[in-house]
Image (tube, grey):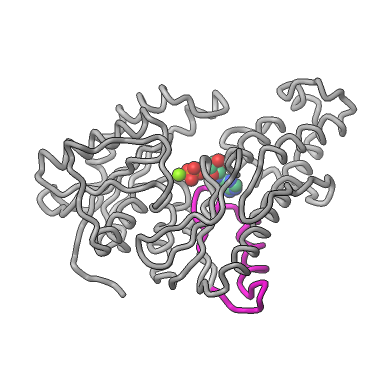
């Protein structure tokens, strides 16, 4: 059910290395969506440096907010509420977004909604498809910092039923890319290299984790050992020395083999979640890793007519909404509003680097 109340939310996102702001009407209509990525800065370093990220947010945040209003063709008077990501994320990065949102809420006299970053990733699907995934649903949240299976009974109701015990899947893509000598961020560069590779060339193990939990640190080490073995080098060889010995074909084959294994692990767990919750009506992918094309193809092939033979629609965020952006924050805040969540006191808003969705 849609609530056409014409509510326009200015939403701010700065939890990691994207400075973003958007204006969203009624949770599903994107009036503007401005994202300034710091990826070019961090490609040089091979990863995010939190202090540098915070300083870059500080430079970009006000122009990004202004551009979001301008693109939407709205003045501040026409904005009904402000939303911002307050958890989880990098401390310094979260601070810039939340301080900006607090300041605007106080100066403009608007209600403030502080939203959870993973909720926002899930709600990117409502923006992408123009239709509402049916509840109850199972969401696979796969990003640079998280790997979780979340059961949603209704709007704004989340239960974590599986989570990683060590590395996140996106982090694993990024670390494996580093071993292979592929640029940061690792996800897109592994996907690109894998196009020329043979996914069956190297056999990589599936972690033995019971239930719906994940583990990815072993897979990363398995790639490291497989590269050392392929090159005939001892296991004491530092990972940063391996890339110069790999041929283009070996690199592509490792990228393809790793990508296929990682996707299979994710899909196997989601299959198990479907069997444990057969009442789930839809499956919703969320987070930066859900942009992966191989994952999308495998998911449609194996999950749509699921392990129990029941048809469940599979949703993916539009690729431009899979990574961090303000639009998804505006959607999440809107569904909080219609679920009866009260605005946050801007003077009391605090940040938290790690908080579970709930
Ligand atoms: P997020 O934390 O949601 O912003 O997502 C960022 C993570 O998604 C990073 O670890 C990226 O390497 C990863 N990522 C982005 N695009 C892809 C892709 N096409 N395939 C796999 N991982 C990806
Ligand atoms: Mg994210």
Q: In terms of image quadrants, where is residue 353? A: top left
Q: In terms of image quadrants, where is residue 335? A: bottom left
Give the vertical position of 53 relative to 327 (above or below). above
In the picture, measured across the screen, residue 136 lies left or right of residue 201, that is left
Residue at the limit of the structure toward the front, as seen here:
210
Give the vertical position of 354 relative to 134 (above or below). above
Which quarter of the rendered image does ligand 2 occupy?
Answer: top left
Out of 233 and 346, give the one closest to the viewer.
Answer: 346
Give the residues in magenta: 284-312
Kindly identify the residue that appears in the image at 67 percent across and 72 percent down: 307
Task: State yes or no: residue 25 in magenta.
Answer: no
Give the vertical position of 58 relative to 168 (above or below). above
Q: In terms of image quadrants, where is residue 193? A: top right
In the picture, measured across the screen, residue 205 lies left or right of residue 156, that is right
Q: Residue 209: x, y in percent? A: 69, 49
Q: Residue 234: x, y in percent? A: 86, 23
Where the N terminus falls, by quadrant? bottom left
Kindly identify the residue that appears in the image at 61 percent across and 33 percent down: 183
Q: Residue 332: x, y in percent? A: 33, 56
Q: Residue 167: x, y in percent? A: 60, 38
């Amino acid at each position: 059910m849609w609530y056409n109340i014409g509510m326009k939310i200015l939403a701010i996102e700065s939890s990691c290395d994207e400075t973003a702001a958007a204006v969203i009407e009624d949770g599903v209509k994107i009036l503007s969506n401005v994202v300034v990525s710091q990826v070019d800065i961090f490609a040089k370093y091979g990863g995010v440096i939190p202090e540098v990220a915070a300083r870059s947010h500080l430079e970009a945040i006000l122009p990004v907010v202004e551009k979001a209003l301008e693109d939407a063709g709205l003045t501040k008077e026409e904005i009904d509420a402000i939303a911002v990501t307050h958890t989880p994320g990098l401390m310094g990065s979260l601070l810039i977004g939340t301080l900006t949102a607090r300041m605007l809420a106080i100066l403009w006299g608007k209600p403030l909604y502080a939203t959870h970053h993973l909720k926002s990733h899930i709600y990117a699907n409502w923006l992408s498809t123009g239709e509402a995934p049916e509840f109850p649903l199972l969401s696979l949240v796969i990003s640079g910092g998280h790997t979780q299976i979340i059961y949603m009974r209704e709007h704004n109701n989340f239960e974590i039923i599986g989570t990683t015990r060590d590395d996140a899947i996106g982090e694993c893509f990024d670390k494996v890319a580093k071993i292979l000598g592929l640029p940061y961020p690792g996800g897109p560069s592994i996907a690109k290299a894998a196009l020329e590779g043979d996914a069956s060339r190297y056999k990589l193990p599936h972690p033995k984790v019971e239930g719906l939990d994940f583990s990815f640190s072993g897979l990363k080490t398995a790639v490291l050992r497989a590269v050392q073995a392929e090159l005939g080098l001892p296991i004491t060889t530092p990972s940063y020395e391996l890339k110069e010995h790999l041929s283009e074909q070996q690199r592509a084959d490792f990228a393809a083999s790793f990508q296929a294994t990682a996707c299979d692990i994710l899909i196997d767990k989601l299959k198990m979640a479907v069997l444990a919750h057969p009442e789930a009506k839809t499956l919703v992918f969320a987070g930066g890793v859900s942009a992966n094309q191989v994952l999308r193809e495998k998911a449609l092939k194996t999950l749509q007519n699921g392990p129990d033979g029941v048809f469940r629609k599979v949703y993916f965020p539009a690729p431009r909404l899979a990574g961090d952006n303000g639009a998804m924050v505006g959607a999440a805040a809107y569904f909080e509003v219609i679920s009866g969540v009260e605005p946050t006191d801007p003077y009391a808003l605090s940040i938290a680097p790690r908080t579970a969705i709930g």
